Amino acid sequence: MRSVELIGKKRDGGELSSAEILHLMRGYVSGEVPDYQMAAWAMAVYFRGMTVDETAALTLAMAQSGDQVNLDGIQGVKVDKHSTGGVGDKTTLIIAPLVAAAGVPVAKMSGRGLGHTGGTIDKLESIAGFQIEMTREQFLNQVNEIGLAVIGQSGNLTPADKKLYALRDVTGTVESMPLIASSIMSKKIAAGADAIVLDVKMGSGAFMKTLDAAEELARTMVEIGNHVGRSTSAIISDMDQPLGFAIGNAIEVAEAVRTLQGDGPEDLTELCLTLGSHMVVLGGKAGSLQEARKLLEDKLSSGEALGKFRELIAAQGGDVCIVDNPELLPQAERLIAVKASHSGYVQAIEAEQLGLAAMGLGAGRATKNDAIDYAVGITLRKKVGDHVEAGDTLAMLHAQSHSEALEERIAQVRDAYTLQQEKPRQRPLLLSIVTAEGIERLAE
């Protein structure tokens, strides 16, 4: 088959077979299909879309283009969790030990973050000594022994997706829903989990700005997962303000520890219990979401979830003392209060602006080769709905003495807050649940 004919077929609204899609992906990875042809095909997909069968075939083709993780050596149903990204999203640090304490094995492969703050791996590496690399045998053995392991992604996981993602970024095809969904799901499929729970963010601090768009993405990913034999469900959650209070790396670890101690922010705790409940049901450890939630609440209140986090840190060489003494985590040299210029209720918080401010302090990376400062970031003191007097502290910057453009960061954080005299309507955290049966809206 000729690639140009497949491009024309999709351009004219035709449906490509699995073999045709596999031909394109294999040819692209090998170099036989050049960038200009793949760019033309991606643009055809952007305008014509893809059927469920096509999207599933593309996902499998990208998953099969590189290494695939075989988790058959791990006992039980392996359930993975994926978030589409947000500001202050440290849920894996809480959910992994929480769900593992409930008896569901968590074999997690995570990447480093690009953008606002580090990824899960960066956050864990802020714990002195924590090792994110191990052999396959060590990985499987650790999950069988303590119920969880979190390691860095394989260097050759989904190379077709890596190439296509970079191409989409410079050809105006990033927003194609089937290409977004297959990109995310190809990595989840290649990582070997039996079931997948997705946390799809919606709002100013997320890629999906509207509920309709978030539901479309969630529906597409759930269809892909179930189509290729992985039980998949999704929760759509609000990202119109940061999750929890901490934005950074070490300070997010400290907040995760407080949450595992039962003293975490209400929104972060609720989201973790909700996502975790779906994982426990898919993992076969509870017959209903209500039963699963009760189980997780018990693991949280009994200290078993916190104990499982200690086991994870110890097993991977980290300093367990940070659980009881979070001040042992990297600390910034300066704490700078960002004050409110006038009184009112916090009407809105531009989550993305706070994320960019944290990145400007050094908490994130613009390119994969940038170094991260684990200590820096932002701790919120006020969130949406809180009343503020002029001069009250809105947030604290964790900065280094040599940090550049601090005044700009202070202004950036202050400007992210909108204060008005009228108290805003309470914003729901959980918006929709998406399963194979359809979409259930939890709030309008």
Image (cartoon, helix red, strand yellow):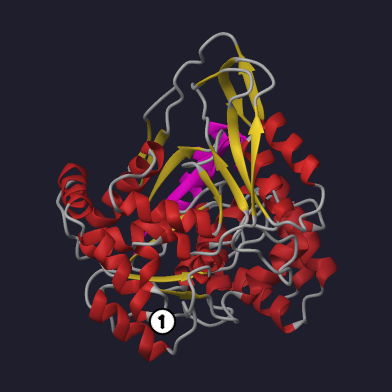
Pick the residue in front: 70 or 51.
70
Pointer 1 residue: 317
Q: Where is residue 237 in the image (x, y as percent from the top left)?
A: 46, 39
- 119 lies left or right of 328: right
Q: Residues within 10 Å of mark 1 (few under 14, many from 20)?
A: some
Residue 394 placement: quadrant: top right
Image quarter in which the N terminus is found: bottom right
Above-or-below relation of 59 to 333: below
The residue positioned 76% from the left and 55% from the top of the image is: 403
Above-or-below relation of 318 to 221: below
- Count the labels in the image: 1
Q: Where is residue 149 in the image (x, y as percent from the top left)?
A: 37, 74
The residue positioned 59% from the left and 36% from the top of the image is: 395
Pick the residue in front: 351 or 226.
351
Image quarter in which the C terminus is found: top left
The residue positioned 46% from the left and 42% from the top of the image is: 244
Above-or-below relation of 243 to 94: above
Residue 213 placement: quadrant: top right
For the record, the magenta segment spans 195-223
Q: Which residue type does callout 1 highlight? A: Gly
